[in-house]
């Protein structure tokens, strides 16, 4: 009888482990990314039971942070975008998430003074360092719009993001 109980317990544990592996595999595929483009997906489907994280608008850090606030500068759009995505990465990771969990990026760009228009190419260059890379292959859906100004003078960019992931198996 004891031998049968051990076999039953072993079978139950193996079954639970297999179900856990199936759940994990299904959870990874539950968020569906569709119509991949160069920098982003056209659509992403997120199941209703997914966990969500919203990151408020972030902008760049000053390249001369020790200067008085009125004299701080932020660099060109590419530099600002890189700084902004590093801030977003820090916020996301502090919450226990990853850049790969980001499914939506909203970008507000101010015209670059030197170009007289938004520097879309500079933005995309920095964006490509954070999404669709070998280390982090996931890409979000996104919107990029030009605006007349942002809350902080000298900012060319502000970004907010939305992330989703499947809950961990319990």
Image (cartoon, grey):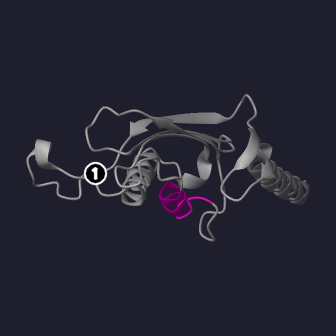
Q: Residue furthest left?
A: 68
Viewed as shown, does residue 109 lie left or right of 35? left
Say whether residue 111 is visible.
yes
| Residue at the (40%, 32%) spot, across then down | 148
Residue 13 picture location, percent across and down: 80, 54
What stretch of residues is rendered in magenta? 121-131
- Element type where label 1 sits in the image: loop
Decide which of 148, 101 is in the foreground and name it. Answer: 148
Residue 48 picture location, percent across and down: 73, 28
- Of helix, strand and loop, which mostly describes the magenta segment? helix
Q: Residue furthest bottom?
A: 134
Viewed as shown, does residue 41 lie left or right of 134? right
Q: How many marks?
A: 1
Decide which of 66, 22 is in the foreground and name it. Answer: 66
Decide whether residue 124 is among the magenta residues.
Answer: yes
Q: Is residue 126 above or below residue 49?
A: below
Residue 61 picture location, percent across and down: 28, 51
Q: Would you name the residue on which mark 1 appears? A: 61
């Amino acid at each position: 009888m004891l031998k049968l109980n051990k076999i039953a317990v072993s079978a139950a544990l193996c079954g639970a482990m297999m179900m856990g592996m199936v759940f994990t595999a299904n959870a990874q595929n539950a968020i569906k990314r569709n119509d991949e483009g160069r920098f982003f997906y056209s659509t992403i489907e997120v199941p209703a039971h997914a966990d969500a994280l919203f990151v408020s608008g972030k902008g760049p850090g000053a390249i001369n942070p020790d200067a008085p606030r009125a004299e701080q500068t932020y660099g060109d759009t590419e530099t600002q975008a890189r700084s902004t995505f590093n801030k977003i990465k820090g916020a996301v990771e502090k919450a226990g998430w990853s850049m790969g969990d980001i499914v939506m990026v909203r970008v507000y760009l101010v015209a670059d003074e030197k170009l007289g228009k938004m520097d879309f190419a500079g933005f995309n260059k920095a964006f490509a360092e954070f999404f669709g890379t070998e280390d982090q292959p996931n890409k979000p859906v996104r919107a990029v719009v030009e605006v007349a100004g942002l809350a902080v003078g000298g900012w060319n960019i502000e970004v907010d993001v939305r992330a989703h992931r499947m809950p961990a198996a319990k």
